[in-house]
Image (spheres, grey):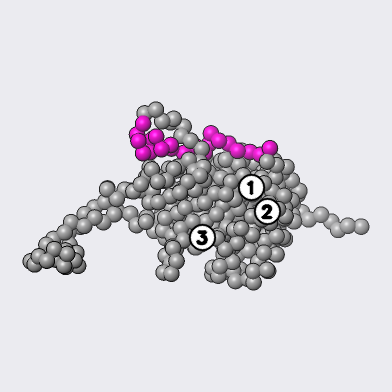
Amino acid sequence: MGGRAPRPLPTDRVHRGDCLELLRRIPDGTVHLAFADPPFNIGYDYDTYDDRRPADDYLAWSCRWLAEIVRVLRADGTFWLAIGDEYAAELKVIATRDLGLTCRSWVVWYYTFGVNCRQKFSRSHAHIFHLVRDPKRFTFNTESIRVPSARELVYGDRRADPAGRLPDDTWILRPQDLPEGFAADGDTWYFPRVCGTFKERGGWHGCQMPEQLLGRIIRASSNPGDLVLDPFAGSGTTLAVAKKLGRSFVGMEMSAAYVAQIRKRLAASRTGQALDGAPEPLKSVPTTAAGRRLARTADKATDVRKRRTGRRGKPDRQKLLVPRSRAD
């Protein structure tokens, strides 16, 4: 005789424990939308998890929890996976080739205030895969995720559709300086990372996702009342946004300290409450032209000019442009 089936997890709360064990308590085919932002295996200092696993061990573990996600998804369910450069390709292959999901979009999340690097280009992006069980039957609410078009942002064209356009493919330069270089209707999404000085910042978790980013995903791929799952709840953004948008939710987190903070965050969130952060960051980000000017002695600039022209004289005062924002 088989063992007793595990007791299903209560919804609308975060549960402390290993996601592999907790996922077993979710019945097959019951989750409308799953979002996962797992550890990237890059040596991040979590309080209860070792983020320095051998590659084979990390990938084997990823196979196990990804298989559980596929099991609990409804036949028309959707899975969004956020991952870094190091294992993006491998996890996409596991999800699609090995587990049978279909990748609808490979989204790149571009953020300001990225990690500064000295011997390579500074990282300012993460990968987000939009995966579905059935490529012909899944939730995608186009009207709820429209973004301003280039007609509106760049050209101020009165013919611009006030409802905007759907997000899709693009490259980004400095969006605040060159809006025509960032097409808002692209699958490269621009949302500022939640930094320590931001009001949205909780201050107790180093990898806090912006609420507006999760808002786009949850609005697009679920409807009010649907069940949203996050097996790596972390700072609790997925759960807080799901609650604000009127979805049911289940979260999982190993860290007792994180769980305690998530529960406080959920207690302070209510259905219908506005999401934190700017809903259209390109409309709110300052431009260099709007910066403030500081007068200072530019000795180095003067020396260079003298060497180029052969002129001598006293250093003059230069008006130097200093942007208001550090969002470079």
Q: Which residue is mark 1?
A: 103
Q: Tell me the crowding category of disc 3: few under 14, some 14 to 19, or many 20 or more residues within 10 angstroms, Cα based.
A: some
Q: In the orientation shown, which residue stands out farthest toward the top? A: 159
Is 44 rendered above or below residue 137?
A: below
Q: Tell me the crowding category of disc 2: few under 14, some 14 to 19, or many 20 or more residues within 10 angstroms, Cα based.
A: many
On-image quarter of the N terminus = bottom right
Segment colored magenta: 136-157
Q: Describe the element under mark 3 as helix, strand or loop.
A: loop
Q: In this orientation, which residue lies closer to the viewer: 324 or 310? A: 310
Quadrant of the rendered image containing residue 157: top left
Q: Tell me the crowding category of disc 1: few under 14, some 14 to 19, or many 20 or more residues within 10 angstroms, Cα based.
A: some
**Disc 1 residue type?**
Cys
Confirm whether the magenta stretch covers residue 20.
no
Q: Quick check: 249 left or right of 25?
A: left
Looking at the picture, how far across and down is residue 192, in whole percent?
Answer: 43, 52
Confirm whether the magenta stretch covers residue 148.
yes
Q: Which residue is mark 3?
A: 207
Q: In this orientation, which residue lies closer to the viewer: 29 or 259? A: 29
Report the Cα–Cα distance between label 2 and label 1. 9 Å
Identify the residue at image location x=46%, y=32%. Answer: 163
Residue 263 visible in the current orientation: no
